[in-house]
Image (tube, rainbow, N blue to C red):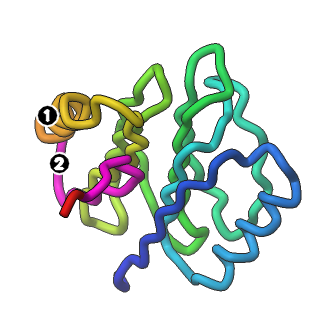
């Protein structure tokens, strides 16, 4: 298995067809294996068909009842991902996805942290990750934590 190239973007909404087209073009140029997208703004159960042939295996977590937050994880078509299980936040802030790439177990985590009270939220979320992690952990996302110097 070749190395995985990972890319993470806060997309600030994917409702516009032109914005999706720009994203797909950028992802094609990046030649990435796994994508992590945050702030997709799709409701839970209302995930549109993002017909991007390079990433046919997509996993989405959206907020219940509102087009807010939301995360997507996608695998390029030549990455042979075998799904095992997942845990997702009903508020659309994270998805923990476990499965195999080849013979190796991975836990892929995509996080979109809130804009306030990040530290308590992150501690709670990372504890959940720690208690459910198997194999190689890959953690990506938008943590909304400003650095202070």
Residue 36 horizontal side relative to residue 104, left or right: right
Q: In the image shown, does 40 or 2 lie closer to the viewer?
A: 40
At 28% from the left and 29% from the top, the residue drawn is: 117
Q: Which residue is mark 1?
A: 127
Q: In the image shown, does 71 or 12 lie closer to the viewer?
A: 12
Q: Is residue 144 magenta?
A: yes
Relative to 32, say whether 117 is above or below. Answer: above
N-terminal label among 1 and 2: 1
Would you identify the image quadrant in which residue 15 lies? Answer: top right
At 66% from the left and 26% from the top, the residue drawn is: 43
> What is the x, y in percent for residue 91?
47, 22
At 55% from the left and 37% from the top, the residue drawn is: 70
The answer to whether marks 1 and 2 mark residues whose Cβ atoms lie closer than 8 Å is no
> What is the x, y in percent for residue 8?
47, 63
Q: Which mark is residue 134?
A: 2
Q: Of helix, strand and loop, which one carries label 2? A: loop
Relative to 137, say whether 1 is above or below. Answer: below
Q: Of helix, strand and loop, which one carries label 1? A: helix
Residue 144 horizontal side relative to residue 68, left or right: left
Q: Gap between marks 1 and 2, in whole Å?
A: 14 Å
Question: Mark 1 packing: few (<14 Cα in 10 Å), some, or many (20+)?
Answer: few
């Amino acid at each position: 298995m070749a190395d995985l190239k990972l890319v993470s973007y806060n997309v600030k909404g994917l409702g516009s067809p032109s914005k999706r087209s720009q994203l797909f073009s950028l992802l094609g140029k990046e030649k990435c294996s796994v994508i992590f997208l945050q702030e997709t703004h799709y409701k839970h159960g209302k995930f549109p068909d993002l017909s991007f042939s390079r990433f046919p295996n997509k996993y989405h977590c959206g907020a219940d009842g509102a087009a807010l937050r939301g995360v997507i994880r996608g695998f390029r078509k030549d990455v042979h991902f075998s799904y095992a299980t997942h845990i997702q936040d009903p508020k659309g802030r994270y998805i923990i996805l476990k499965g195999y790439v080849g013979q190796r177990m991975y836990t892929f985590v995509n996080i979109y942290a809130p804009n306030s009270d990040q530290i308590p939220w992150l501690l709670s979320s990372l504890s959940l990750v720690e208690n459910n992690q198997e194999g190689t952990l890959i953690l990506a996302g938008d943590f909304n934590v400003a650095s202070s110097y």
